[in-house]
Amino acid sequence: MIKETVVSGIRSTGKLHIGNYYGAVKNFVQMQHEYNCYFFIADLHSLTTHPTPQDLHGNIKQVLVEYLACGIDPETTTIYIQSDVPEVSELYLYLNMNAYLGELERATSFKDKVRANPDNVNAGLLTYPVLMAADILIHRATKVPVGKDQEQHLEMARTFGNRFNRLYSNEYFPEPYAFSYSNNLVKVPGLDGKGKMGKSEGEGNAVYLSDSPEVIRKKVSRAVTDSGPTAENQDKPEAIQNLFDLMKIVSSADTLAHFEEQYNKMAIRYGDFKKQLAEDMIVTTAPMRERINEIAADTAYLRQVAKHGALKARESAQKTIREVREIIGFKSF
């Protein structure tokens, strides 16, 4: 039976945190055995923020190392660096010819970025959805794991693919749809007592897979708490519930039940609670942290993985570009 093709981009912005792992990466590890998966590190996309060459290369390496450490198998799936597949840029060019200013300016993410960075409104930001469409359509994918904030981009990928099909009277590109693993999706809160764990929320909000035990203990000890419950069995405020939700992810059921009981009896000591949470986080991340250190030191292996991934991705991409060029009318004399 032919497996459906799944494409997913990986942001090339450095370290993964526990939220990334339980929110998406753990699902990628499962998906790679069930689908024909292409996971790419989106270094071309990152150029809209003008990273330095040192930061760009370092971030790409860090992301590749950490995805491999989490269980992405380069023999089972295709993991590659976006810029190693020039066919993506070629398809991006062709799709841009049929993407219109009005629809690109109406994209929610573009408007958000213009508001946030009015001095850096570059063409790459405007055509960001076109590059995303090229990433998906280059492998003629039918499933794309996306969060709510990316659903509009996926809709635009369908628009550009369908527009190409209509323009050239050829049903070449299939329609890609959101891959739903909502039953396995875990929302991981941050340590700041507010929303989800994320790098953009500040360094102290996230626990990274590569953090040392000392760093994890320090971060968790500074997590936001209150003065404690004032009545038995009272509802927890958001900051405290967030910490219990984190414990639910990394600790045993017995440990969670113990501290739930302590809270409900107004006997909880947050110092003990946070010490236990930190130690359980250390234990949970230990295998991945050890693998990160091991893989990061093996330059030859990383070079081999990147080269192997590029070859596999280009085999698919070259076929698409060859057929797209023929459909458009580019032919050798």
Image (spheres, rainbow, N blue to C red):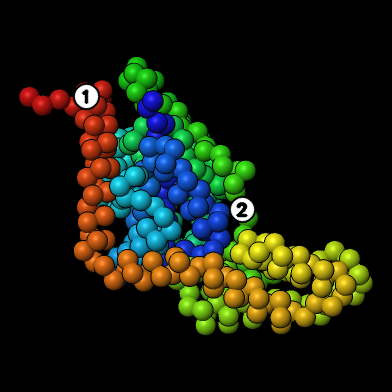
Labels 2 & 1 near each other (Cβ < 8 A): no
On the image, the x and y values in percent for residue 255 come to: 70, 68
Q: What is the residue that sits farthest to the right in this orientation?
A: 231
In this view, 130 is above or below 272? above
Q: Amino acid at mark 1?
A: Glu
Q: Quadrant of the C terminus?
A: top left
- In this view, the residue in front, 111 or 290, is 290
Query: Measuring 38% from the left and 37% from the top, which residue is drawn there?
Result: 36
Query: In the displayed structure, does residue 37 sit left or right of residue 195?
Result: left
| Helix, strand or loop under label 1 | helix
In three-dimensional space, the C-alpha distance between marks 2 and 1, rounded to whole angstroms, equals 44 Å
Binning the other alpha carbons within 10 Å of mark 2 as few (below 14), some (14 to 19) or many (20 upward) gives some
The answer to whether residue 245 of the structure is visible from this angle is: no
Query: In the displayed structure, does residue 305 sit left or right of residue 154?
Result: left
Mark 2 or mark 1, earlier in chain:
2
In this view, 1 is above or below 216? above
The quadrant holding residue 164 is top left
Query: Measuring 48% from the left and 74% from the top, which residue is drawn there?
Result: 211
On the image, the x and y values in percent for residue 58 come to: 32, 68
Q: Quadrant of the N terminus?
A: top left
| Helix, strand or loop under label 2 | loop
The answer to whether residue 258 of the structure is visible from this angle is: yes
- In this view, the residue in front, 172 or 48, is 172
Query: Measuring 52% from the left and 82% from the top, which residue is drawn there?
Result: 214
- In this view, the residue in front, 86 or 31, is 31
Q: Residue 326 — which label?
A: 1
Q: Amino acid at mark 2?
A: Val
Identify residue for label 2: 186
On the image, the x and y values in percent for residue 252 come to: 66, 64
Query: Measuring 23% from the left and 49% from the top, which residue is drawn there?
Result: 308
